[in-house]
């Protein structure tokens, strides 16, 4: 029997009466691939790390060898192993009064079922009035799961503490791939993790990353404004002085694009960075594509694109979830789609299986020029990778200059923030006074305040405001829901692997849903906070206003 790893799972408890089903407690479950948590119970166990967990289903329950006293309402979670031996797992919890024969000081374990016909095994562990039952059934009917079931039940502990067992990183790593952003955010916000400066900083980063997928959601604006507040206050007098001394600085979008277009004519490679939770940076990158294309740029090298799937991406001509994590964000997806529509070849260049990620990125970028000496490349990178003379260690841009002999033009969107009255401000870095709190190892700074709206990407004439009546929303009045809108042609091909064109979290006031989208056909999917799919259907943003079956 081979197992990749063993992990702990934990469940916290407030206790409940024997007649109460577990349904309301299941919403408090936490998984991290290696851990399971529920902040309503107080149980722990070791399971195997090659099991994928999910919510209880009646279909899985019906496959269970029925035992008196174990009901669907007692089913806490189910699991499926994906490494031999392959099996289904059902994990039950209930509370009931036992007779005098049960040891109330020390837990006892016992075999309940060992079926020779289908190979299923059921063990239970009892302590006082609490019972854990673990049921495993082989998928092929031949593999022996007795040892796995016995090992799991023997590891069960009651009244366990989670104090050092759960982290925001654990939670994010499990729920970051869930299509329902509201559900993932809820899991972070309700996690029973003690507040410390470090834990709150980690939580902010994950929340900002998730909520960057729903930029119209007020909570996103609130946490970003709070994060940038001190920096804006520090930068305001510095930037004001620069703008007063140097009147020729571009202060609007059109002038900035034209300036970069003129610079690009004499460059072979332009590097633009982003903050990973700031989609407006992707909007500016999208607006820059046409100017670069007119100057002969044909390669778009994207740090966030998964190298293993870049060939599929270029052939398919639209991104999917496999293309990368950050590229799942709607504006990032639109950026990549437009680049491919314009004829750019997408290049993935990031490298993680290496001792020097910065140098590996530079080497991968240099390969473009080794293959095509006349190439002109637009590099879209993360945060500090474009620094050219960093005192704290060489970054990708500096390595690239040394390896290739090509001096990149670097534009930083991350370092300077503020001055919201201007869509963008484009400042040569040598005009900004040296300051220990400003990293000026780039050629230009861009202050980006572009709004997060689809009319930044699409022509106004192609966008329409529509209202749809969705009966399924009636029970959710005053509750928050999450919905994603997908291009229909992409969704029909890629289904749950599709990248949405729009995500929103809204509070339901009635059964009407208001949408602002380009004309066309879409798939809409709506979930509640508990990750239940409320509605899935095709919609048409085109007269007449209707839902199509």
Image (spheres, rainbow, N blue to C red):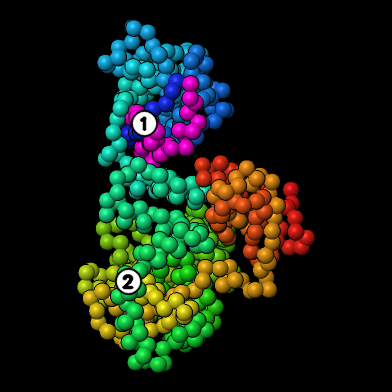
At a point 30% along the width and 36% down the height, the residue shown is 162
Count of all numbered marks drawn on residues in the image: 2
Q: Taking 548 as reference, is 125 left or right? A: left
Q: Circle 2: is it few (<14), some (14-19), or many (20+) Cα within 10 Å?
A: some
Disc with the residue nearer the chain's start (2 vs 1): 1
| Element marked by disc 2 | helix
Q: Quadrant of the N terminus?
A: top left
- Asked if residue 430 shows in the view, the reply is yes
Provide the residue span drawn in magenta.
Answer: 19-48
Quadrant assignment, res 277: bottom left
- Residue at image mark 2: 231
- Asked if residue 89 shows in the view, the reply is no
Residue 285's x, y, as percent? 48, 73
> Whole-Å distance between the Cαs marked 2 and 1?
42 Å
Quadrant assignment, res 102: top left
Residue 28's x, y, as percent? 43, 37
Q: Taking 293 as reference, is 199 left or right? A: left
User: Hey, which residue is sitting farthest right in the picture?
Assistant: 544
| Element marked by disc 1 | strand
- Residue in front for this viewpoint, 502 or 328: 502
Residue 136's x, y, as percent? 44, 23
Find out whether residue 69 is within the magenta segment: no
At a point 25% along the width and 70% down the height, the residue shown is 394
- Residue at image mark 1: 13
At a point 41% along the width and 20% down the height, the residue shown is 95
Q: Circle 1: is it few (<14), some (14-19), or many (20+) Cα within 10 Å?
A: some
At a point 50% along the width and 77% down the height, the residue shown is 288
Quadrant assignment, res 243: bottom left
Find out whether residue 23 is within the magenta segment: yes
- Residue in front for this viewpoint, 429 or 355: 429
> Residue 519, relative to residue 528: is it above or below?
below
């Amino acid at each position: 029997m081979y197992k990749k790893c063993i992990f702990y799972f934990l469940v916290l408890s407030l206790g409940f009466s024997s007649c109460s089903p577990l349904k309301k407690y299941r919403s408090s479950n936490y998984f991290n691939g290696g851990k399971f948590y529920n902040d309503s119970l107080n149980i722990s166990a070791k399971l195997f790390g090659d099991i994928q967990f999910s919510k209880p289903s009646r279909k899985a329950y019906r496959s269970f060898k029925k035992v008196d006293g174990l009901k669907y309402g007692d089913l806490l979670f189910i699991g499926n192993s994906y490494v031999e031996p392959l099996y289904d797992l059902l994990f039950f919890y209930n509370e009931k009064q036992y007779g005098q024969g049960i040891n109330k000081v020390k837990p006892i374990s016992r075999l309940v079922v060992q079926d020779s016909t289908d190979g299923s095994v059921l063990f239970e562990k009892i302590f006082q009035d609490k019972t854990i039952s673990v049921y495993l059934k082989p998928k092929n009917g031949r593999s022996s799961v007795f040892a796995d079931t016995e090992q799991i039940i023997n590891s069960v502990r009651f009244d366990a503490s989670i104090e050092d067992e759960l982290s925001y990183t654990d939670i994010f790593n499990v729920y970051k791939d869930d299509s329902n952003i509201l559900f993932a955010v809820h899991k972070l916000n309700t996690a029973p993790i003690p507040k410390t400066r470090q834990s709150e900083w980690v939580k902010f980063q994950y929340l900002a990353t998730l909520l960057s997928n729903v930029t119209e959601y007020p909570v996103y604006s609130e946490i970003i404004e709070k994060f940038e507040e001190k920096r804006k206050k520090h930068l305001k007098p510095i930037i004001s002085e620069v703008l007063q001394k140097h009147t020729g600085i571009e202060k609007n979008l059109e002038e900035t694009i034209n300036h970069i277009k003129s610079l690009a004519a004499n460059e072979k490679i332009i590097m633009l960075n982003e903050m990973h939770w700031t989609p407006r940076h992707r909007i500016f990158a999208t607006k820059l594509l046409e100017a670069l294309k007119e100057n002969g740029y044909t390669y778009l090298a994207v740090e966030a694109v998964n190298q293993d799937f870049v060939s599929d991406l270029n052939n398919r001509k639209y991104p999917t979830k496999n293309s990368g994590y950050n590229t799942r964000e709607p504006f990032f997806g639109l950026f990549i789609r437009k680049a491919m529509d314009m004829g750019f070849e997408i290049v993935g260049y990031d490298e993680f299986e290496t001792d020097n990620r910065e140098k590996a990125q530079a080497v991968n970028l240099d390969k473009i020029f080794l293959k095509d000496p006349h190439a002109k490349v637009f590099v879209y990178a993360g945060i500090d990778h474009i620094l050219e003379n960093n005192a704290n260690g060489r970054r990708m841009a500096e390595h690239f200059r040394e390896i290739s002999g090509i001096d990149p033009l670097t534009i930083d969107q991350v370092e300077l923030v503020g001055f919201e009255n201007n869509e963008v401000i484009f400042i040569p870095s040598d005009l900004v006074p040296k300051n220990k709190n400003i990293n000026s190892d780039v050629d230009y700074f861009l202050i980006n305040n572009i709004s997060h709206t689809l009319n930044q990407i699409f022509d106004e004439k192609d966008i329409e405001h529509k209202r749809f009546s969705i009966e399924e929303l009636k029970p959710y009045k005053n509750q928050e829901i999450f919905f994603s809108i997908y291009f229909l042609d992409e969704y029909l091909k890629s289904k749950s692997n599709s990248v949405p064109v729009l995500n929103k979290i809204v509070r339901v006031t009635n059964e009407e849903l208001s949408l602002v989208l380009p004309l066309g056909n879409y798939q809409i999917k709506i979930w509640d906070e508990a990750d239940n799919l409320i509605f899935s259907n095709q919609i048409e943003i085109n007269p007449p206003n209707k839902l199509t079956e």
